[in-house]
Image: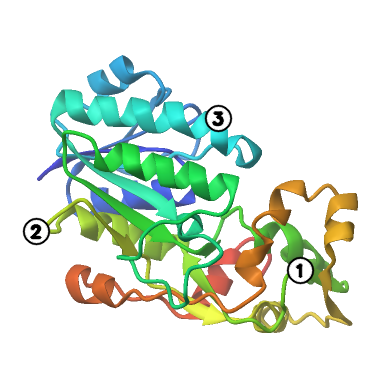
């Protein structure tokens, strides 16, 4: 049995803690607001990851720390750095391995699809730059580090472009709008598959200081909207794409710089994750059903 600390109590962090506890490990789940839904055999501690000394105290004896904390989207360039710095310092203080939950933004707009985990990071957005700097700080730590990179999330409780922009209209059976090219194939990551990849990475015996991609399923936004509507038995009278002026008028300022993710095909190569970590993607239908858990 090992001792693990999961920093961040969002959907992926909670699922990671649950999976680790099911394997019989001692698990602490910590965040600034752990929440009221207790997990069996998981100790919840309210703490701020930016407080390295407090986090170090919590992590004493930990074999690995999972950094799953999230910053407010529009404050990534400022709020994420104290979080990763506090977590890195805690990992160094207790000698724990560090497993970071990241995403694909660091590859930038000019990366060729399908994205491979060994591609150099070349961010073309503020958020991608923030993610890149976070990984650079983690991989320079005096402890082994791995980053698990996910695409846009599906899953219960996931906050994503799909859940924010398209899903409310689908649920209400209204005309639905999304961003980018509605027919460009896009990779979608399941929160539960992200957690499975994090847990599997803790057992990785190869060389650390590298990234793995979450095994994902691919579908165009139009296909995803149609499948979701069909699962809800909703009729969607129209599907269209927001223009940039519309996005600006609607206050979608934070989405505009990331619109490139949906303007051309975005595929993810996770073959090394499947071969080395033994994790495979859930079906798209399972991802959608879990996303809709409260609406079916």
Tag 3 and tag 2, C-beta contact below 8 Å: no
- Is the residue marked by circle 1 packed among few (<14), some (14-19), or many (20+) residues within 10 Å? many
- Name which of mark 2 and mark 1 comes first in the sequence: 1
Q: Which mark is residue 290?
A: none
- Is the residue marked by circle 3 packed among few (<14), some (14-19), or many (20+) residues within 10 Å? few
Judging depth in this view, the residue of 77 and 224 nearest the camera is 77
- Is the residue marked by circle 2 packed among few (<14), some (14-19), or many (20+) residues within 10 Å? few
Q: CA distance from mark 3 to mark 1?
A: 28 Å
Q: Quadrant of the C terminus?
A: bottom right
Helix, strand or loop at label 2? It is loop
- Name which of mark 3 and mark 2 comes first in the sequence: 3
Lateral position of residue 188 relative to residue 17, left or right: right
Identify the residue position indicated by label 1 in the image. 178
Helix, strand or loop at label 1? It is strand
Question: Quadrant of the rendered structure where residue 210 is?
Answer: bottom left
Res. 222 in view: yes
Residue at horizontal 27%, vertical 25%?
89
Tag 2 and tag 1, C-beta contact below 8 Å: no
Q: Which mark is residue 78?
A: 3
> Height in image: 262 above or below 163?
below
Judging depth in this view, the residue of 50 and 115 nearest the camera is 115
Lateral position of residue 201 relative to residue 79, left or right: left
Residue sticking out furthest to the top: 53
Give the x, y percent position of residue 258.
64, 57
Give the x, y percent position of residue 245.
88, 58
Helix, strand or loop at label 3? It is helix
Tag nearer the camera, 3 or 1: 3
Give the x, y percent position of residue 227.
66, 83
Residue at horizontal 19%, vertical 52%?
202
**Colour pattern:** rainbow
Identify the residue position indicated by label 2 in the image. 205
């Amino acid at each position: 049995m090992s001792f693990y600390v999961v920093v961040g109590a969002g959907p992926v962090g909670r699922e990671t803690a649950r999976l680790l506890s099911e394997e019989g490990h001692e698990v602490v789940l910590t965040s600034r607001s752990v929440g009221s839904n207790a997990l069996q055999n998981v100790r919840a501690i309210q703490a701020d990851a930016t407080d390295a000394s407090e986090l170090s105290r919590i992590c004493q004896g930990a074999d690995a720390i999972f950094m799953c904390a999230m910053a407010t989207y529009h404050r990534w360039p400022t709020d994420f750095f104290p979080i990763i710095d506090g977590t890195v310092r805690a990992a160094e203080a207790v000698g724990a391995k560090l497993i970071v939950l990241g995403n694909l933004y660091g590859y930038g707009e000019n990366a060729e699809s399908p994205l491979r985990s060994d591609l150099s990071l070349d961010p073309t957005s503020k958020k991608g730059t923030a993610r890149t700097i976070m990984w650079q700080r983690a991989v320079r730590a005096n402890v082994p580090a791995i980053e698990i990179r996910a695409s846009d999330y599906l899953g219960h409780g996931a906050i994503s472009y799909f859940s924010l922009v398209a899903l409310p209209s689908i649920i209400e059976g209204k005309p639905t709008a999304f961003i980018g090219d509605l027919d460009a194939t896009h990779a979608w990551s399941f929160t539960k598959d992200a957690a499975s990849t994090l847990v599997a990475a803790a057992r990785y015996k190869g060389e650390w200081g590298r990234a793995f991609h979450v095994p994902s399923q691919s579908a165009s936004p139009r296909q995803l909207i149609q499948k979701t509507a069909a699962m809800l038995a909703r009729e969607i009278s129209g599907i269209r794409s927001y223009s940039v002026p519309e996005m600006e008028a609607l206050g979608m300022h934070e989405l505009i710089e990331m619109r490139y993710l949906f303007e051309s095909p975005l595929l993810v190569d996770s073959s090394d994750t499947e071969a080395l970590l033994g994790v495979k993607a859930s079906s798209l239908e399972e991802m959608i059903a879990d996303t809709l858990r409260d609406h079916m």
